[in-house]
Amino acid sequence: MKTLSKLFPALVILLLSSCGGTAQNLKEGEKAPDFTLQDSYGKSYSLSQYKGVAPVVVYFYPKASTPGCTKEACSFRDNISKFKEKNIPVFGISVDSKEKIKNFIDEYHLNFPLLSDENKDVSKSYGVLNKLGIDSRITFIIDKEGKIYKIIRDVDVAKHSEDVYPIVAKLM
């Protein structure tokens, strides 16, 4: 039983990586699909509100409060001041409920918006919804004109924000 419990995280990662949701429907240079989603407090955010104003980081994550998603969110939390200094919005999106997202925010003191795509429409439009019905871990950097500047499919959760920042900062 101990061996199975040690192998379980690796099996989950392998399973998730083989379940689709690769955003192959979108290409760098194309217009990013617009969206309007709410955070866990009911505040709405639209991608289009940043057009002509600032580049935007949109990262999709599988499930709130899981180890990888927690590391990724905490990476952004710990480095969000750099993004805010340049007025670069960062949004995490998952298909989790607003309640589950609120618990995640409260537990880890997250200081940027996490948006709920519970009906999965945005996840489908970005091509990140996998066969398990959750989002694959993919990040989109969207320029000021609303075009996809960079798609990051290979994410190091522990330092993701550090990898993303120099890319998005040069778009200012």
Image (cartoon, rainbow, N blue to C red):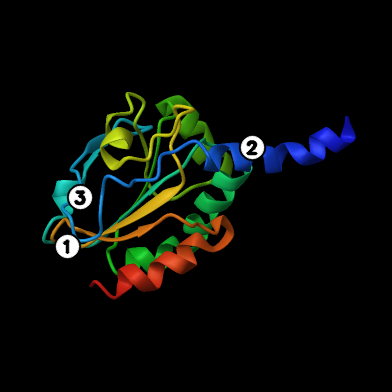
Q: Position of residue 75 (x, y in %)?
A: 53, 58
> Of the numbered discs in the image, which one, if any, rests on residue 144?
1
Furthest-right residue in view? 2
Q: Which quarter shows the C terminus?
A: bottom left
Residue 59 at least partly seen: yes
Distance from disc 1 to disc 2, alpha carbons, whole Å, reads 36 Å
Q: Position of residue 111 (x, y in %)?
A: 44, 50
Q: Is residue 106 left or right of residue 96?
A: right
Distance from disc 1 to disc 3, alpha carbons, whole Å, reads 11 Å
Asked whether 123 or 17 is in front, the reply is 17
Vertically, is 36 above or below 70?
above
**Label 1: few (<14), some or many (≥20) within 10 Å?**
some
The first of marks 1 and 2 along the sequence is: 2
**Label 2: few (<14), some or many (≥20) within 10 Å?**
few
Q: Position of residue 38 (x, y in %)?
A: 29, 33
Q: What residue is at 32 percent from the left and 40 percent from the top?
A: 127
Q: Which residue is mark 2?
A: 12
Q: Which residue is mark 3?
A: 32
Question: Picture quarter containing residue 153?
Answer: bottom left
Question: Picture quarter containing residue 16?
Answer: top right
Residue 38 at least partly seen: no
The first of marks 2 and 3 along the sequence is: 2
Which marked residue is nearer to the observer: mark 2 or mark 3?
A: 2
For label 1, the SS is loop
Asked whether 73 or 111 is in front, the reply is 73
The first of marks 1 and 3 along the sequence is: 3
Asked whether 158 or 42 is in front, the reply is 158
